[in-house]
Image: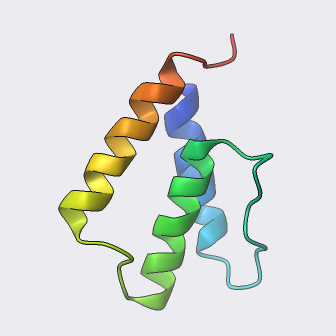
Amino acid sequence: MTWAQDEMVAGYFDGRIPDSPEPSANRSRSYRHGFQSGRDDLARKPSAPYDVRRKQAEEVLAAESLFAPQ
């Protein structure tokens, strides 16, 4: 997995924990996207249709792959 994918997965798992605080701008876009997906699953209510969230994930991963830490 890439750095951005790792961040997205970490955010997802944190988002599934009910008392995890909302991430701020100090977290990557990938992490924040994953966090929202985790929250969506926790609430059992998507914040957007699947195809929209999937496209957002692809855009975030593509953008962050350009600036990934080495």
Q: How is the image coloured?
A: rainbow
* Percent coordinates x, y for residue 19 in the rendering: 77, 83
Up/down of 31 relative to 4, above or below: below
Residue 65: horizontal and vertical position, in percent? 49, 21
Q: Tell me where residue 46 appears, x and y as whole percent.
A: 35, 79
Residue displayed at 59% across by 75% down: 16
Does 68 sit above or below residue 11? above
Farthest-out residue, left: 51
Closest to the observer: 35 or 10?
35
Quarter of the image with the C terminus is: top right
Left or right of residue 48, residue 10 in this image:
right
Left or right of 53? Residue 9 is right
Q: Residue at x 80, y 46 (%)?
A: 26
Q: Answer left or right for 48 relative to 3.
A: left
Q: Nearer the viewer, residue 24 or 21?
A: 24
Relative vertical location of residue 29 with respect to residue 52 in this rendering, above or below: above
- Residue 24 percent across, percent down from the top left: 77, 58
Q: Name the residue rendered at 46%, 27% in the picture.
A: 63
Q: Residue furthest front?
A: 25
